[in-house]
Image: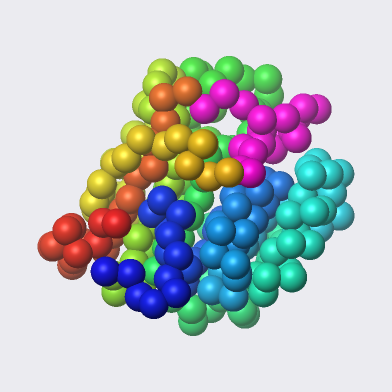
Amino acid sequence: MAGEGEKWVKHYSSSHKMLLVGEGDFSFSACLARAFGSAKNMISTSLDSEEMLMVKHPTAKANLKELKKLGCIILHELDCHTMTDHPFLKFMKFDRIIFNFPHAGLQYQWEENQKRQIMLHQEVVKGFFRIARDMLAAKGQVHVTHKTGHPYSKWEVEKLAEEAGLCLAEEVEFKKLDYPGYHNKRGYGKKCNRTFRVGLCSTFKFILPIQTGPSEQVD
């Protein structure tokens, strides 16, 4: 049962303490904050510096302004493999840790279906899982939204999470229409601010293995 004044956007509640990782132009964070009417429970991050972010994603400027106005904490130059080293995040625990469409960038003009490129993607995701596991609250969830068609299914996201000490609680279909104003971004190359076709896609929800009652965890 939702608490008084609690607002929901799909899997996310205004009462959740949330960490959003690898935000492109911060439009996903802005979508949630706008619906909640507040971002005081949110920390939103990007790997890029603020200066580089504005070069790659000019659309981020308005989203950052809105997020800050609503009380969101913004962190730039945050590597998902070393998040716990950041002095602000070092001892924090979260109800939801969210990473939408993790990607290593295309290296050496490799194609997405090449084994070497897939291995690079897997290293990004596995490193994220290892750190995120230690940042979860007792009943928290790590959410990764990821394409599920070929060749993205070869990433084996569920296996990577298991190797990092997490268990799959639920896999649900991802629909962009559920998040008004969200624009997924490429994030690399000359067309980095362009969106891309989502296609077959799921949000994977992972929990700590000690939690044996998924019904308690899944919203």
Nearer to the camera, 17 or 181: 181
Q: Name the residue located 79 percent from the left edge and 44 percent from the top edge.
A: 59
Q: Give the magenta part as a residue range.
A: 181-198
User: How far across and how far down the image is residue 66, in percent?
Assistant: 74, 62
Classify residue 102 as left or right of residue 76.
left
- Name above or below for residue 98 compared with residue 210: above
- Name above or below for residue 95 compared with residue 147: below
- Name above or below for residue 98 compared with residue 149: below
Kindly indicate the quadrant of the structure image that contains residue 160: top left
Q: Residue furthest left?
A: 212
Q: Is residue 186 magenta?
A: yes
Nearer to the camera, 186 or 198: 198
Nearer to the camera, 13 or 121: 13
Q: Residue furthest front?
A: 4
User: How far across and how far down the image is residue 121, in percent?
Assistant: 51, 36
Q: Is residue 28 magenta?
A: no
Q: Name the residue located 29 percent from the left edge and 41 percent from the top edge.
A: 171
Residue 26 in sight: yes
